[in-house]
Image: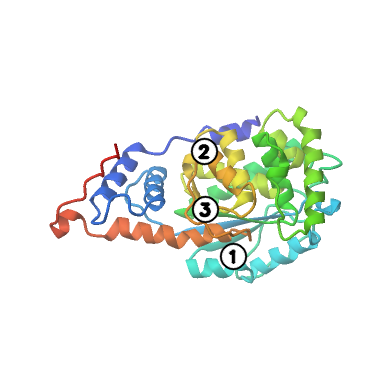
């Protein structure tokens, strides 16, 4: 592994157990039925451990949207051409995309990042572009490796550094998003190599492929997995063979969450692939992640189960951009409000609920 990356990872420490125990005790005293907010309670406890503070605050929230193009689009695996990536990315900087509209309502700051779009981008003023371009898109992985190993490491470190910048600005919560035509193809290929599963069961229609397009997409991925699998010795090999700059950067964001102790919200399928890459690079990294929703893509639930993460939302979403992650932010904020401000049983002078007995 690259020495610079090793140095970053050496800073990771486990979530604070004492803060988590205090948070669990607080939930037990809140004047409501025990565990009645389900996963929301678990996630607030997790955030307490990540932040090393049982006084959970989510005041400052940021969404990092990593934008990049993928050479595999040349193989006809998408409904639209890669020129759409640039157009949508530029719209994001103007606040004119689905996730930007949702983020405004949810009180989340948006940071569009050019990780590897195929042309130079013009930035709007609403959410100014962050330029971290590694290259003008990846190569076509049906012909050669998508990127070099050095480029993959550079992209991972870039993601870590983006989290460092959020940490310096005092952000309490980070959400992941992406924009890149062809990135469900790269993600399905990476997932197949990570999980050692047939890509047929992991690959969906992405942004609306018809039956013929789906057959072609699956065939391209199957051939690539068969070609690269024997030579992939680690996760960075997998990324460089069939990944994308957005995936590599998001891998760094998840690692950065653990390094800088900022909880990171997964979005859907694509970010879950990056989350699994991060977990494989640094086992235990998942303890700093929160699952927002179950993607409608075939591998969405499989990846969350592999990560042992419980999602907050099941709504059949598969839009991307970070929309699922942003949809979960108000839920977390509401849970944090209950946790922080609701009266305890002692305050209202009634007997606390007792744990239910397990059925015999």
Q: For residue 99, which numbered disc appears in the image?
A: 1
Instruction: Determine whether label 1 and label 2 are within 8 Å by CB.
Output: no
Q: Residue 79 vs residue 11: left or right?
A: right
| Along the viewing direction, whichever of 137 and 3 lies nearer the viewer | 137
The span from disc 2 to disc 3 (Cα, nearest Å) is 18 Å
Q: Residue 285 carries which label?
A: 2
Tell me whether circle 2 and circle 3 mark residues in contact (CB < 8 Å). no
State which tag comes first along the sequence, 2 or 3: 3
- Decide which of tag 1 and tag 3 comes sooner along the chain: 1
Which residue is disc 3 drawn over?
Answer: 166
User: Are there few (<14), some (14-19), or many (20+) residues within 10 Å of tag 2?
Assistant: many
| Mark 1 burial class by Cα count in 10 Å: few <14, some 14-19, many 20+ | many
User: Is the C terminus in the top left, top right, bottom left or bottom right quadrant?
Assistant: top left
Residue 104 in the figure: left or right of residue 114: left
Residue at x-position 62% and y-position 50%: 269
Q: Is mark 2 on a helix, strand or loop?
A: helix
Distance CA(mark 1)–CA(mark 2): 26 Å
Number of numbered discs present? 3
* Distance between mark 1 and mark 3 Cα atoms: 19 Å
Q: Where is residue 349 in the image (x, y as percent from the top left)?
A: 12, 57
Q: Quadrant of residue 178?
A: bottom right
Q: Which residue is drawn at 44% across and 54% down?
A: 172
Quadrant of the snapshot with the N terminus:
top right
Q: What element carries label 1?
A: helix
Q: Is residue 183 above or below residue 6?
A: below
**Is residue 138 visible from the viewing direction of this image?**
yes
């Amino acid at each position: 592994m690259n020495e610079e990356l090793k140095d970053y990872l050496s800073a990771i420490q486990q979530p604070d157990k004492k803060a988590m125990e205090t948070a669990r005790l607080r939930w037990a005293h809140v004047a409501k039925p025990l565990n009645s907010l389900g996963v929301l309670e678990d996630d607030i406890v997790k955030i307490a451990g990540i932040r090393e503070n049982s006084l959970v605050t989510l005041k400052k929230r940021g969404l990092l949207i990593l934008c990049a193009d993928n050479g595999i689009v040349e193989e006809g695996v998408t409904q639209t051409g890669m020129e759409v990536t640039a157009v949508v990315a530029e719209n994001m900087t103007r606040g004119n995309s689905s996730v930007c509209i949702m983020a405004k309502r949810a009180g989340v700051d948006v940071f569009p990042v050019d990780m590897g779009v195929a042309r130079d981008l013009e930035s709007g003023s609403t959410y100014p572009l962050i330029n971290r371009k590694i290259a003008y898109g990846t190569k076509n992985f049906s012909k050669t490796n998508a990127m070099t190993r050095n480029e993959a490491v550079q992209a991972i470190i870039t993601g870590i550094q983006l989290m460092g910048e959020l940490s310096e600005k005092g952000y309490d919560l980070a959400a992941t998003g992406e924009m890149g035509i062809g990135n469900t193809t790269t993600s399905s290929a990476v997932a197949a190599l990570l999980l050692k599963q047939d890509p047929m069961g992991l690959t969906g229609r992405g942004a609306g492929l018809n039956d013929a397009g789906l057959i072609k997409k699956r065939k391209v991925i199957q051939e690539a997995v068969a070609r690269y699998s024997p030579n992939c010795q680690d996760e960075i090999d997998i990324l460089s063979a069939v990944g994308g700059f957005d995936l590599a950067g998001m891998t760094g964001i998840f690692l950065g969450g653990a390094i800088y102790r900022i909880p990171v919200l997964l979005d859907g399928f694509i970010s879950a692939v990056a989350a699994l890459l991060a977990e494989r690079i640094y086992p235990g990294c998942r303890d700093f992640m929160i699952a927002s929703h179950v993607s409608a893509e075939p591998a969405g639930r499989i990846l969350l189960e592999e990560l042992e993460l419980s999602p907050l939302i099941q709504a059949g979403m598969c839009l991307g951009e970070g929309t699922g992650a942003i949809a979960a932010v108000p839920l977390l904020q509401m849970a944090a409000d209950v946790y922080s401000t609701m009266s305890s049983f002692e305050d209202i002078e009634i007997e606390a609920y007792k744990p239910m007995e397990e059925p015999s």
